[in-house]
Amino acid sequence: VAERELIALVRDRIPHDGFILGPGDDAAVLEAGRVAWSTDLAIEGVHFTRRTGASPADAAVKALNRNLSDLAAMGAEPLAFLLAVGLPAADAAGVEAMADALAEVCVRNDLRIAGGDLSGSETLMFAISILGRVEEPLTRSGARAGDVLAITGALGEAAAGLFADRLPGSSVTSAMRERNGRGCARVREGLALRPFATSAIDISDGTAIDVGRVAEASGVRIVLDPAKLPRGHGVARASEILERDLALNGGDDYELAITLEPDQVDLARAAISPTPLTVVGVCVDGTGVTDPEGNPLEGGHEHLA
Amino acid sequence: VAERELIALVRDRIPHDGFILGPGDDAAVLEAGRVAWSTDLAIEGVHFTRRTGASPADAAVKALNRNLSDLAAMGAEPLAFLLAVGLPAADAAGVEAMADALAEVCVRNDLRIAGGDLSGSETLMFAISILGRVEEPLTRSGARAGDVLAITGALGEAAAGLFADRLPGSSVTSAMRERNGRGCARVREGLALRPFATSAIDISDGTAIDVGRVAEASGVRIVLDPAKLPRGHGVARASEILERDLALNGGDDYELAITLEPDQVDLARAAISPTPLTVVGVCVDGTGVTDPEGNPLEGGHEHLA
């Protein structure tokens, strides 16, 4: 299949309306206004694996969700994305399924494809760039002593799915494997939490490491109680130590960690219902992330070899 | 070196002022307005090689110029870029030189870095996303029968540099090798040509294939005289057949091909002086790209394996 045919196949399957100039020229042209803008790589062997049965379409969806999750953490409204794909020859037959899977995510998030790039590659990789509209962005730097730390949804299922073959028996379900490929970014929740949150981050690298980034950017210490971390259903049946590690350091969950004043919790919880919002810690004077006994919490995923 | 230190090293070396929220959060925030937006991959072994002595810094500059060239072809003014790098462990030591080289391109083009992503990777790769401001974009689709086709600068040196070891002797200079790593995008020229051009494209994939894209998007036939293609100094000393092939199909030159009405040529030429503008063809009714005898011209680089 020629490059141009593959490109047309992708474009035709994914919404691409509403641009001044859509896919097909040297660049797309659009009225962007005030935007949040982000990029994330997803490289096979680093960010995803087929070992658990995930398909290239699962990987494409994961790549797009990694980017949507960044917009969610800014409280931004998804606008459009560019899709650059490094495609091994053996995966060319999977491009149609990738495009269809991405189209599903687009429809769910009112997102459009503005263009992209396609190249041969030894390794399957996705480099997505995403634009979202935002007036008052949520940042990592607004947490203040006295704020509480809260987390959307539940943690650890993606990591449990990824390490399925190393987990003891029946606690890993096919839904968890699926979630590793297809976890949804909390776009709706990020928009709804904007009036209440003093800071926000997406915790796709792992709760401990990402909360640490908020602590650093905001100049506070965050006291996080690992026992309070909301666990996914399958994770809660794993052994206690594993369970804690999955929730604290698992990564790939695409949940949001926000800080907010204590009297805003009920309002924030109502705003994102039925998605859970669980208070797991508090901000105090100091630096770093610790458990309630003062022990540093570390871990999570840096993607550099 | 840790991921965060490498990221700080890159950010600190490249201009990143003027954003509502600059690098370091989940996304950058900026007042973008009406923008041209593009992405291009540069993967080792596909888009660049170290075989000719090019360094990772050369490759990074080439990657950024590939993206700037897309903005040039839209007649857009560079605003900011996101830099995603897949970095083999062995190249971590070269990150400082990469950042310094990119900073040079930024200063020359009034461009800023808004953020990015960094990941381990077996292959060195760059995925850049770029935003430029544009009011009335140049497109591929505006060529009309009666327009002439003109090309900025000179062609073939980049390809000659790339294939230096297969070229006969003395015609390849170190400047040509350098150009393959560091060719400059025609940003100033794209902006200056906007009032005159009816269509534009950057011809980084090769003159024949890219002019063919204009013919297709505009619904015209383009008659291109290969003998008129402007050759770089070194290329003109190569054998006649090789010379024609380098100019017609070499790729990587980051020159612009524009169409314009014949009576606009002198004005357009004056607008981009001292960069040459050479008339090499004419648009007529029909489809495709041919030489003056009517033979189809084909070739160039698709980057899919």
Image (cartoon, coloured by chain):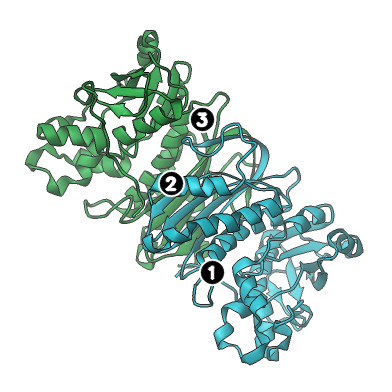
Chain colours: A cyan, B green
- Tag 1 subunit: A
Tag 3: residue type?
Glu
Question: Gap in Å between the C-alphas at discs 3 and 1?
Answer: 35 Å
**Residue A220 quadrant:** bottom right
What is the x, y in percent for residue A280? 79, 74
First in sequence: mark 2 vs mark 1: 2
Pointer 3: residues within 10 angstroms few (<14), some, or many (20+)? many
Residue A66, position as x, y percentages in the image: 60, 60
Q: Position of residue A92 (x, y in %)?
A: 42, 58
Query: Does residue B104 show up?
Result: no
The amino acid at mark 1 is Glu
The residue carrying mark 1 is: A302
The residue shown at (35%, 32%) is B212
**Cα separation between marks 3 and 2:** 31 Å
Identify the subunit bearing mark 3. Answer: B
| Mark 1 crowd level (few <14, some 14–19, many ≥20, 10 Å Cα) | some
Number of callouts: 3
Query: Do dots 2 and 1 share one subunit?
Result: yes
Q: Are marks 3 and 2 in contact (CB under 8 Å)?
A: no
Q: Which residue is mark 2?
A: A5
**Disc 2 marks which amino acid?**
Glu
Name the residue nearer the viewer: B53 or A157.
A157
Q: Are marks 3 and 1 on the same chain?
A: no
* B173 in relation to A88, above or below: above
Q: Residue at x 71, y 49 (%)?
A: A76
Kindly state the secondary structure of the residue where label 3 is placed.
Answer: strand
Judging depth in this view, the residue of A212 and A235 nearest the camera is A235
Q: Which mark is residue B77?
A: 3
